[in-house]
Amino acid sequence: MARRVGAAVERAGAALLEVDTTAAETVVAADQEINALQFEVDDRIVALMTQYDPVAADLRFILSAVRISVDLERMGDLAKHVAKTVVRRSPAPAIPESLRADFTTMGRAAVRISEKLVRILAEHDRLQAAQMSLDDDELDAVQRRIHEQLPGLGYGPQAAVDAALLARFFERFGDHAVRISHQVVYLVTGDVRLDRS
Amino acid sequence: MARRVGAAVERAGAALLEVDTTAAETVVAADQEINALQFEVDDRIVALMTQYDPVAADLRFILSAVRISVDLERMGDLAKHVAKTVVRRSPAPAIPESLRADFTTMGRAAVRISEKLVRILAEHDRLQAAQMSLDDDELDAVQRRIHEQLPGLGYGPQAAVDAALLARFFERFGDHAVRISHQVVYLVTGDVRLDRS
């Protein structure tokens, strides 16, 4: 799921910058596969649980696995939202030229976050998981910068709204990655009292 | 959780219309209690599961309970986002006068949805759960109307962005209620293949 989500956000980010409607439509269509994987996760959880007698550690694992699949599914949705905005504004670009650099940064950060997420989930790397919020800080900072700039850039309300929502999609993408990382830390350490605000 | 979320969105919606910073700050502060309840849900799930030998039906219940608490926590966040926007723009109103009617509608729909959600969760009412998407359709329609109107209303980009994001917060609030309702239907019927797109 994390790999597909990473591919989706990478393609969506590129489609946004290159006004590539075909690529954007691919992202929209491929989101169904991410959703389907969430059902597979559920099925496997139930199968595992009925096969084995669960102890507290298994339960902790299950709570985390369910939450992680919810967050990954949502990350797929957010990549899809970026792609849908591209399609909606096509053939015009969805973002103005002067925000291109900021959205390039956000797209790159989202891809980097996804790649880290794959490693964190595959290797249960607690250190990388704990550092995820630093990567997310970059997305938050760029989103704030875009929101603060918008009033002074002289855009029409449509362009301003598109830019604000697109920035929010990337920012939320990062938030979910942080939540997943917290779940992994919880899995590894049992420390549940992480900030979920 | 659903009751507190309902109280939060009701207070946040009223604070938005009345530019009531004090009420908005109460919503922001009270969100911690909703987050704490999510941890309580987890603790109770683990306690129940270690006490009893789970069968497939229990597992289904657990998957749903975990997801529902995730969605409720997120609904609390969205009410908080509305409240934070009120605080941020205070003493100026966060929404322009001409969108007042639309946001009144959204606020009312969100409250109605929350009240239904409490009943659905308390009574496992499948019919009401199935109808939740109709209430959500109203939020979607108003959001669409706000987004479509924005370019022609002559607002500055800041006001347009605020209105677009506020409308999105209410719309997402409804989406989570629909997801919870789907979980309840799944709980009652075992029918998992509901649209989660």
Image (cartoon, coloured by chain):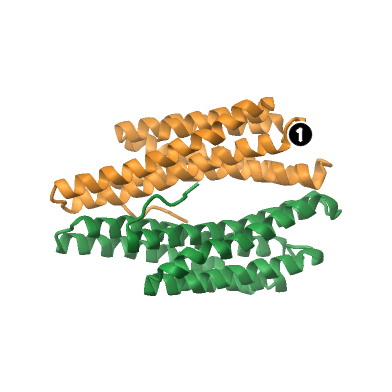
Chain colours: A green, B orange
- The residue under label 1 is B96
Residue B192 visible to an observer of this rendering:
yes
Decide which of B187, B133 is in the foreground and name it.
Answer: B187
Amino acid type at mark 1: Pro
Which quarter of the picture shows residue A98? bottom right
Chain under disc 1: B
Q: Residue B179 at x, y = what percent?
A: 42, 47
Residue at image position (61%, 74%) is: A23
Decide which of A34, B71 is in the foreground and name it.
Answer: B71
Which quarter of the picture shows residue A47? bottom left
Q: How many marks?
A: 1
Image position of B167 (left or right of B91) = left
Image position of A136 (left or right of B163) = left
Quadrant in the picture for the N terminus of chain A: bottom left
Q: Residue B38 at x, y = what percent?
A: 38, 43
Reply above or below: B91 against B75. Answer: above
